[in-house]
Amino acid sequence: MNESVMTAVRAIIKVNGVAIGIFRSIRTTENIQRGDVRGVGNFTSQELPALGVTCTFNADMYMIDLRNSTIPGLDPRNVSSIETYANSLLFGGRPVDLYIYKKEAVVQQGQAIVDEVTEGEFAVIRDLHLESSGFDITEGQITGRNMSGRYLTPIILPA
């Protein structure tokens, strides 16, 4: 059973060991920038060396309120003034690590009943930096919050 396809129902998203928010979705994209080496006299590329990587994320959450519908530590809005908020972004911005776990069943041999569930590591998104934040209130819909930005370290899958 533990080899089942990963579904949203099986995901647990944590920051600092605490499960956070009611996520609708989380999406990551890692783009590798490549150079183009042709050499004199060559019409086609001879090599495409990797020059860098840009990693982005987008998280959509159901919104309770602006204070609680967020990725903790990513957007320091709980302050008393615009100046404090600006200074917090300029000088205090610390990246956040987001851990995604996959619920896995502990099944005893020959039984179809699941009495226990464990958390297996699915992915760790390290060094998140916020670039965009917004919310949406639409008639007939559930209000949502969106946060997006970049992260510094590509997701690594240990051997």
Image (cartoon, helix red, strand yellow):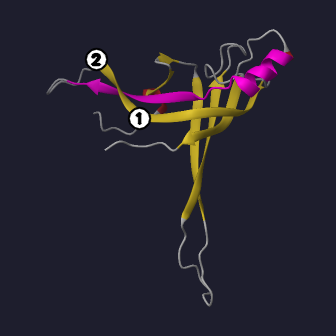
Residue 17 inside the magenta-drawn segment: no
Q: Quadrant of residue 110?
A: top left
**Residue on which disc 2 sits:** 116
Query: Among all residues in the image, which is located at the extreme front?
Result: 91
The span from disc 1 to disc 2 (Cα, nearest Å) is 18 Å
Image mark for residue 39: none
Chain part drawn in magenta: 83-107
Residue beneath the point at 84% across and 12% down? 81
Q: Quadrant of the N terminus?
A: top left
Closest to the observer, 71 or 136: 71
What amino acid is at disc 1?
Answer: Phe
Relative to 157, is 23 on the left or the right?
A: right
Query: Among all residues in the image, which is located at the extreme top?
Result: 80
Q: Position of residue 63 (x, y in %)?
A: 68, 19
Residue 31 higher or lower than 81, as above or below: below
Relative to 12, is 42 on the left or the right?
A: right
Q: Quadrant of residue 22?
A: top right
Q: Position of residue 111 (x, y in %)?
A: 18, 24
Image mark for residue 122: 1
